[in-house]
Amino acid sequence: MSYWVTLILKISIPFVLIFSLVPFLVWLERKGSAYIQDRPGPNRAAILGLRLGGLLHPLADVIKLIFKENIMPARAHRFFYILAPGLALFVASITYLVIPFAEPTLINNELFYFQGAHLNIGILYILALSSLGVYALLLAGWSSNNKFALLGGLRSASQMISYELSLGLALISLIMWTGSLAINDIIVSQTHLPWHWNFIFDPIAFLVFFIAVFAETNRTPFDLPEGESELVAGYHVEYSSLKFAMFFMAEYVHIIIASALMAALFFGGWQIPFVSSSFLREHCSSFVFFGLIFTACFLLLLGIILITNNKKIHYKDLRDFESVIMGVFLLLLGLSCLVYVLLFGKAPLSDNAVIWITAFLQGCVFLFKILVFCWIFIWVRWTLPRMRYDQLMKLGWKILLPLSMANIIVTAIRMIITNG
Amino acid sequence: MADYLFYIFSFITVLTVLLMIFQKNPLASALLLILGFFSLAALYILLHAPFIAALQILVYAGAIMVLFVFVIMLLNLKKTVSPPDTGWIKKTLIFLVGSVLFLFFVFAFFCIPETLFPAVSEGFGSPEKIGELLFSKYIIAFELIDILLLAGIVGAVLLGKKET
């Protein structure tokens, strides 16, 4: 019985986490792009006067998309037209299952893996699913019965299959060195010291993977298929309402998965830098103690700053008191942390609590790394111009592919010289 | 449990492939074939070969069929017009030859001894085992396939070169 319960929890908790990170990422993109372009970004949508710095805008987007007219183009192929966004979202929804969020630990004398599916072919599963994502774009472009959509779909598909090769080959040198396809083994082999992480160890693989994953997610500078000035949004031009929302969501989930892969394979995943898991488990209570004091101070400071932020009263409704409300909320959170610390201090925690707190901290570090890479995705999008199609293909086939193949040979020579 | 899964997935494979043959729309055939590859990959997993299952989806359904679908989309084939009806002589001949082949197959199936399939070893189907086998026992076949692929690549590059 508890096997099924843990399985359902292991599958649903990362799912909920990733899919609630999507609106946050939409907000981050709009605010981030705004500040890069020296403007304030969306800050108007509000509930009962609370604007929350524009965090409600993704909710407004979703509501708008739900209520738009659901168009079926006149001579579109119905079945494929409806299948394409579903396929895109399906592929995006099941990729996260092999990504571990914390170190596998012994619970009740049984190794408990913090990932949905413990396959011994981890990375291959993700690569297989990303080659299925190509079909969603192809079908969307073709079934819309629109020349621009067809061109966009074909371009996007050819771009994705070209960069898939470099992606796989870049990962092969990493897999050769670690000796296993499972992502967990790759994370464990990069120890907790940041100079052992794979981005220093194999920088060419990191570079090739970084560039190829931008092309895989159809993200600038490789977003010619959805180029708004050339192809009128490419393969999803004939989609409206919820089907477009599904493509939109699938793209952001792909960004999150790509960031998670980069963090896991090259930056140590759930490893907290300079803190190994055994060290964390031994000194867990002091970690909790100092961590709570730190968060309490931070929250109290933020709360006090927000409360004393005097603005002129010119709205004459709840919006004037927004900073006060948020400040009070943060103040209460900080006070509760402080109360816990004062009550319990450095009391030793039970074994079970230690395991779950370690897992929680490692998961938080992993989430932080994912968010850093998502920010890098957004940053690059609004900095670099788009590449032309032939430049893109040349980069993929003539530069990245030979580079990754040479990297495999170099890694093999390194392995022979240092005896594995 | 594994038995039920085997029956379900083999049923799906046979059904999709049969449906694929009778489609009028070529793109629907291609997509049904991809579905067939999926259930085939599931059968591979049931046979304790997850590596081959993943490679089936990655290479066959994910790369080769993409190129097929590309060609179908670019050629923009209309729905096929069915050819004129064949006479009853041809139809009976086809039926007889087909049933003879089918009977051969059934007969061969019942001739397989049970001792031909021993139980699998411990690390069967894992990437390490496959790598070991590829580079020790089947190395010649591996290298010959490499040369075949190289010939294919050289041919493709030659065909795609512009006439200067």
Image (cartoon, coloured by chain):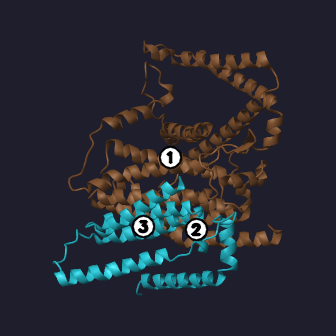
**Quick check: can you spot residue B17?**
yes
**Residue at the (61%, 83%) spot, across then down:** B141
Q: Residues within 10 Å of mark 1 (few under 14, many from 20)?
A: many
Left/right of residue A140 with respect to residue A108 in the rendered view? left
Measured as percent of width and height from the top left, residue A358 is found at 73, 36
Quadrant in which the N terminus of chain A appears: top right
Residue B145 vs A46, above or below: the answer is below
Q: Are marks 1 and 2 in contact (CB under 8 Å)?
A: no
- Tell me: A15 left or right of B33: right
B63 relative to A72, above or below: below
Chain to which mark 1 belongs = A
Q: Dot 3 lies on which element?
A: helix
Instruction: Tell me what residue is drawn at x 74 percent, y 30 percent.
Output: A353
Q: Quadrant of the C terminus of chain A?
A: bottom right
The chain whose colour is cyan is B
- Pick the front one: A352 or A307: A352
Q: Amino acid at mark 1?
A: Val
Where does label 3 land, which residue?
B66
